[in-house]
Image: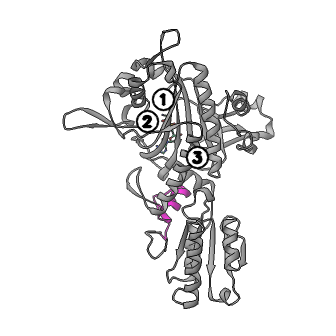
Amino acid sequence: MRLSQFFLPTLKEVPSEAQIVSHQLMLRAGMIRQSSAGIYSWLPLGYRVLRKIEQIVREEQDAIGAQELLMPTIQPADIWRESGRYDDYGKEMLRITDRHDRDMLYGPTNEELITEIVKASIKSYRDLPKLLYHIQWKFRDEVRPRFGVMRGREFLMKDSYSFDLDYDGARRVYNKTFLSYLRTYARMGLKAIPMKADTGPIGGDLSHEFIILADTGESQVFCDRELIERDALKDAASLEGDLQAEVDAWTSRYAATDEMHDQSRFESEVPADRQVTARGIEVGHIFYFGTKYSEAMGAVVTTQDGEQVPLEMGSYGIGVSRLVGAIIEASHDENGIVWPRPVAPFDVGLINLKSGDADCDRAAAGLYESFKLAGLDVLYDDTDGRAGAKFANMDLIGLPFQVVVGPRGLKSGVVEIKNRATGQRYELSPESALAHLTG
Ligand code: 5CA
């Protein structure tokens, strides 16, 4: 993509409405624009990141055998009356009446709708287990939408739902999802810590939140430092079997959000030098709630013995749009965003320091083509701005690498590569630059 053609409305000033750094940077870097409180448009740069995150989430869901479908954003009120949540959900639910005076709502979550779908077609234990997910917009009319996409009213969520015959089956898929979430976040360059959590309006008695530590997080959290230092990818090689030992290895160490925190247990179980009290951002939340919805909605299956039993269920959420903000909170410096490569909107920013100069134009255009051919996503700054402004802009949008083509370097046959995260700079021939970026 040539910057001269790209829609990238960056801002020079820090917008006054933005209180936390990720919100400020997302506005400044031209990633999002607010349309009304807690509702955002995703501009091209931001949308690229959102799609990258979505894709990692999708791959990891597919890897554990979850099947993707797509449910609508608008749901009928009737199924929520059946489960008993229509009134309970209160003002957070956006209620809509259609032209026939039918009560509808913009879905805040999908337990009822998926139960309705599964109930209609799964009748026998032979059809189980099933694990279904979608990545879809949700609406919750939050009292205080704030911090940009971190607490929006409209937000993108991956929500999956599991259906099993018995508790053992339900526990197995809970464990599999638990471990696959650690992998999912690790792939985005994040360290997420599973913490015992409250179940809130979803219900149930077993629940974990996945928290990344950040000073601007909305939750107060308490955990054993050992969990922070642990490598999430190390012990999650194969997600087969009941996985109880692997999950226990995480949950046996103290980690809780403030609603579930027990100070005396914390002090007795965790040595003083390992007690961490911090702020955290909830990037995922999983629930086992058994037969809460299946019983209320009559979703039953026939067992091998011919008995009718309600389905055992769980639901599992990842805050896809919140993750964009959360990753920035975890990865930025005073000059702007520092994208972890797997979620970066482009791999490389190519800067032509002297657009209009025949040699620079030729060299930069040549590199642009060869980078693209090698499969790199490149944002090519072909504009005629000042060098300082170009560098500042590239730092702000945080692409992992910058490649700088200037008249002085070209005379000695080199371009400069800057690693955005480390600040390291190298002078390399154009061929070695390509090898460096693809190696
Ligand atoms: N049905 C269950 C699991 S699928 C559910 O709705 N869980 S949840 O309420 O915990 O939401 C799942 C994830 O969505 C949260 O962990 C959080 O990362 C994200 N999320 C929740 N509310 C918001 C919001 N207002 N803005 C942005 N992300 C949100």
Res. 128 mark: none
Mark 2 CB within 8 Å of ligand 1: yes
Residue 81 position within the rendered picture, expressed as x and y whole percent measured from the top left: 34, 24
Question: Disc 1 and disc 3: Cα gap in Å?
Answer: 22 Å
Looking at the magenta stretch, what is its main secondary structure? loop
Res. 202 mark: 1
Mark 1 CB within 8 Å of ligand 1: yes
Question: Disc 2 and disc 3: Cα gap in Å?
Answer: 23 Å
Q: Earlier in the sequence, mark 1 or mark 3?
A: 1
Seen from the viewer's position, the closer of residues 347 and 108 is: 347
Q: Secondary structure at mark 1?
A: helix
Mark 2 vs 3: CB contact within 8 A: no
Q: Which residues are magenta?
A: 11-31
At 53% across and 26% down in the image, what residue appears?
Answer: 129
Mark 3 residue crowding within 10 angstroms, few (<14) / some (14–19) / many (20+)? many
Q: Secondary structure at mark 2?
A: loop
Residue 84 in view: no
At 80% across and 35% down in the image, what residue appears?
Answer: 271
Residue 328 position by quadrant: bottom right
At 62% across and 78% down in the image, what residue appears?
Answer: 404
Mark 2 vs 1: CB contact within 8 A: yes
